[in-house]
Image (cartoon, helix red, strand yellow):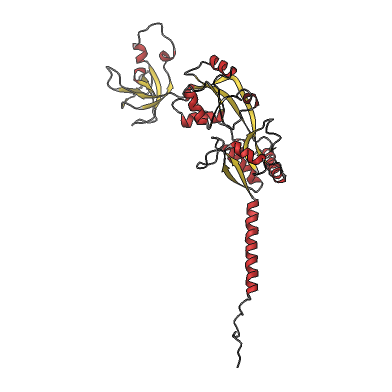
Amino acid sequence: MNKTPYKTGFLKPRSHSHCALKAVMIMSAALLSFSAKAEKTVTVLTDSWEPYINTPDQPLGIAAKLLNILLDYQGLESRWQHLPYELSFHQVENNKRLVSFPYFKTKQRQNAVIYSEPIFSVTSKVYYNRAFRSADTAKLAYANKQRVGKVAGYSYGQSIDQEVEQAAVFATEKQALTALFNHDIEVLPMTEGVMNYQLTHNFPQRQQLILAIDNIADTSSLHAVAAKNDQGKAIIDKINHAFISLNKAGISSIQTTTTAMPEPVDIARLMTSEGYPLIIGQTAASGDDVDYYTLPQGTKALIIEWSQKIIQPSKTDRIYKNMMDLSKVVLLNGPHVGKELFVRNMHIELL
């Protein structure tokens, strides 16, 4: 009688040692795969600096996108981690983290870390609130270091940095700009693109109050920084190589960090006037072929062209003709939205 427990045609079960060996091999392969993936992922320390570096819940800012392009060119993925810039630089300087971005290059910092080649440039200016200061008195306040503000951990380029060493420090750009609106400070340095962003997104109704002092500006380059070790040198070499290669290839995507503030515009609400219970808009200032539209009270409009009687001074205080003169607007809401019409000045109330 055959007492062999395994019937012909069936495979014998593998030994425990064979199964264990296979498990080890699978785990090793998984670890190697994870390690290879980890080697291709670079953690970049940064902090919010709109519009260059956006907050974590927003799409990447324009500078973050630029560094992503450079890393992707080298087959690397980026993982962005937000920490205060001062802490990020400290971590990189002490070899606790590998890379951080973006930074101005200063004498104080340049021996502490490895800097990349210039990746993009920005211009910083010194701003004042025209509600409290004229251009001349603002310039005098800055020269005398009188109630100057700045944002913690930021550089504005060497020429401005040395003038604001003792300035009042604020945690964020929004807090610093709020202090300028509240007259807690007299002047505030800020990068043009950042100021444009802050005014447009956080203070749209008051952006015409903030002006830059003439002839005070610093245009400086920004860089990635890495730890002073072999890994840091390797990542900076990759970033530099990618930037030089893409520049030579004429890739315009790496030259898109310029920001500009929209030209100021006058927004108005159209209102009735005493003796004129309806607002009339007309398709031409004069002529025989003119159509007239009745406009609802409260219609919003963008002023395209102010009438000459508004722009030019008058030799008399009789205002009837000034009231009746026509300015050109484009309607922003209501039944005739988008139409360009002429309306009488007496109906225009600026918002």
Q: Quadrant of residue 21?
A: bottom right
Q: Residue at x 63, y 41 (%)?
A: 91
Q: Nearer the viewer, residue 151 or 338?
A: 151
Viewport quadrant of the C terminus? top left
Figure label count: 0
Where residue 212 sits in the image (x, y, percent)? 55, 21
- The residue lying furthest to the top in this view is 315
- The residue lying furthest to the right in this view is 230
Where residue 301 sits in the image (x, y, percent)? 39, 26
Q: Residue at x 54, y 17 (%)?
A: 138
Q: Nearer the viewer, residue 101 or 201?
A: 101
Q: Nearer the viewer, residue 279 or 165?
A: 165
Where residue 267 sits in the image (x, y, percent)? 41, 25
Viewport quadrant of the N terminus? bottom right
Where residue 94 sits in the image (x, y, percent)? 67, 41
Q: Quadrant of residue 291?
A: top left
Left/right placement of residue 220 relative to residue 318 reads: right
Q: Quadrant of residue 113?
A: top right
